[in-house]
Image (cartoon, grey):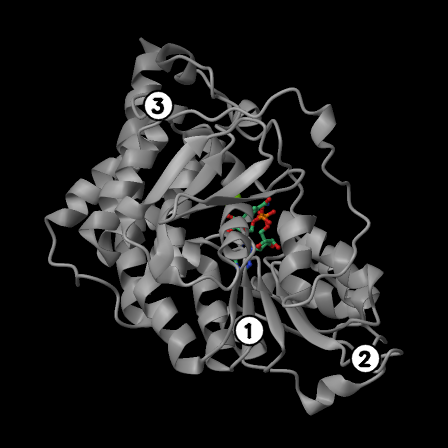
């Protein structure tokens, strides 16, 4: 996958890896930049993208010496152009420009856009033959069959950035898949682990986005607080590793030290451990299949008082069993689950609905969609986006009703 063009400028005669970074201004984007900027002899940056923060994106593009900067929002193009004036770095805007940027073949695309908005550019990148470091799990939740079919057809490497999946990827090593009995993904349990159902009704966006172990974007932080993140990761794991849903187990592990485990048929269990820091899985993907030393914090086992594991409480966190049911129902259902969840998380962050309403909105949207004649699983990008739009419509309907009920109760 290393191209002739990427053979430039490396002092130790190793080819520099050409990298594009989609979602450069986010939490994963920022951690990726830390590594790319620290090792300029190892990486040459082609494209960086953001939703609409033109100033930050221009600064990133200059710092990394990127060739092209793209904003999803066309209204941000004028400020991007102004901020890049005289640098020789190209700029463009809009969803189609994101796709065209993804069509530039590179050695590795880091897919770190949040939500189903990342699906079209990530698929375009796969179709261009670029390897993918995948943080954007919503791609697989939304269109897992389509996505994995494209990965196989284009014979690219799909490297999981999500810490649990990266752990499984590492613990699998080169072992024969048929010898795997099951895998275990761990979950920190999020900020509301010990909260009662009554307390959860009053959970605020600030509390939901204050994660005890990880510093992440708002959407994935809220998903961690409902355990919908782990529900999405269950679906992500099924597609990434081609396992049956029943072979994937979730355990609450509040210390976030053991990220994932693979249990083999001879009774051996291989686990991957590290401090909770996304630089670790990102470094693993950026340099794969090599391992390079990084400056990040190391795990000090003797300083740990305990490592604990427990079953998740499905009653307080119904998002997890709901995701399992959607996975069993098929690709249409996981697509609706993702779209409805994106709408519900936004509504919670905008104070329109309460925390327990997030999963209720997703469940109601799934029930409503089950009565429609949706295709079993999206067979094309257009079909995936059409089901996604329907999921958003159903969820928005439910949010509007819930928030007006809420306003009425507050007036009484
Ligand atoms: P974030 O909100 O911090 O960043 C999201 C990025 O996507 C930003 O650069 C933003 O500008 C861009 N973006 C947002 N909407 C867009 C749109 N409509 N079109 C184009 N670009 C858009 O999110 P994050 O925490 O970095 O998470 C990114 C992805 O990685 C998510 O799918 C998340 O689930 C996954 N992930 C994150 C972490 C973490 O620690 N943050 C860990 C594992 C997986
Ligand atoms: Mg994760």
Of label 1 and label 3, which has the lower sequence position? Answer: 1
Residue 326 drawn at (x, y percent): 24, 46
Q: Which residue is mark 3?
A: 313
* 322 lies left or right of 207: left
Q: Is residue 98 above or below residue 365?
A: below
Mark on residue 131? 1
State which mark lies toward you, 1 or 2.
1
Q: Nearer the viewer, mark 3 or mark 2?
A: 3
Query: Judging from the image, what secondary structure is the residue with disc 3 in?
Result: loop
As drawn, is 202 to the left or to the right of 45?
left
Mark 2 — residue?
A: 88
Q: Nearer the viewer, residue 220 or 397?
A: 220
Q: Residue furthest top?
A: 412
Secondary-structure class at tag 1: strand
Residue at horizontal 81%, vertical 85%? 8
Q: Are marks 1 and 2 in contact (CB under 8 Å)?
A: no
Marks 1 and 2, how far apart at CA: 27 Å
């Amino acid at each position: 996958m290393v191209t002739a063009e990427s053979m430039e400028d490396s002092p130790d005669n190793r080819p520099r890896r050409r990298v594009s970074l989609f979602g450069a201004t986010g939490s994963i984007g920022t951690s990726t930049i830390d590594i790319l900027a620290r090792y300029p002899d190892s990486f040459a940056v082609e494209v960086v993208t953001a939703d609409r923060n033109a100033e930050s994106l221009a600064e990133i593009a200059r710092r990394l010496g990127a060739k092209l900067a793209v904003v999803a929002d066309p209204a941000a193009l004028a400020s991007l152009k102004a901020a890049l004036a005289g640098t020789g770095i190209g700029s463009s805007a809009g969803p189609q420009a994101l796709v065209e940027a993804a069509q530039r073949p590179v050695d590795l695309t880091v897919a770190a856009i949040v939500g189903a908005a990342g699906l079209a550019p990530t698929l375009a990148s796969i179709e261009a033959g670029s390897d993918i470091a995948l943080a954007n799990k919503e791609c697989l939740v939304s269109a897992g069959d389509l996505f994995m079919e494209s990965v196989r057809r284009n014979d690219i490497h799909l490297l999981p950035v999500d810490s649990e999946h990266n752990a499984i990827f590492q613990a699998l090593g080169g072992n024969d898949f048929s010898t795997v009995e099951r895998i275990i993904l761990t979950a920190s349990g999020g900020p509301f682990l010990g909260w009662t159902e009554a307390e959860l009704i009053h959970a605020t966006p600030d509390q939901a986005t204050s994660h005890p172990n990880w510093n992440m974007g708002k959407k994935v932080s809220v998903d961690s607080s409902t355990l919908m993140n782990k529900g999405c990761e269950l679906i992500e794991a099924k597609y990434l590793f081609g396992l049956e849903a029943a072979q994937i187990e979730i355990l609450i592990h509040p210390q976030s030290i053991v990220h994932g485990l693979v249990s083999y048929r001879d009774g051996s269990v291989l686990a991957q451990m590290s401090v909770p820091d996304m630089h670790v899985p990102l470094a693993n993907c950026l340099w794969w299949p090599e391992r390079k030393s990084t400056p990040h914090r190391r795990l000090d086992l003797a300083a740990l008082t305990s490592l604990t594991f427990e079953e998740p409480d499905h009653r307080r966190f119904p998002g997890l069993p709901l995701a399992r049911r959607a996975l069993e129902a098929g690709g249409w259902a996981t697509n609706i689950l993702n779209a409805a969840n994106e709408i519900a998380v936004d509504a919670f962050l905008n104070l329109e609905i309460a925390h327990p309403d997030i999963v209720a909105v997703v469940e109601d949207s799934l029930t409503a969609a089950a009565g429609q004649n949706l295709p079993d699983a999206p067979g094309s990008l257009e079909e995936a986006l059409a089901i996604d739009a329907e999921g958003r419509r159903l969820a928005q309907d439910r949010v509007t009703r819930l928030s007006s009920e809420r306003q009425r109760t507050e007036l009484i």
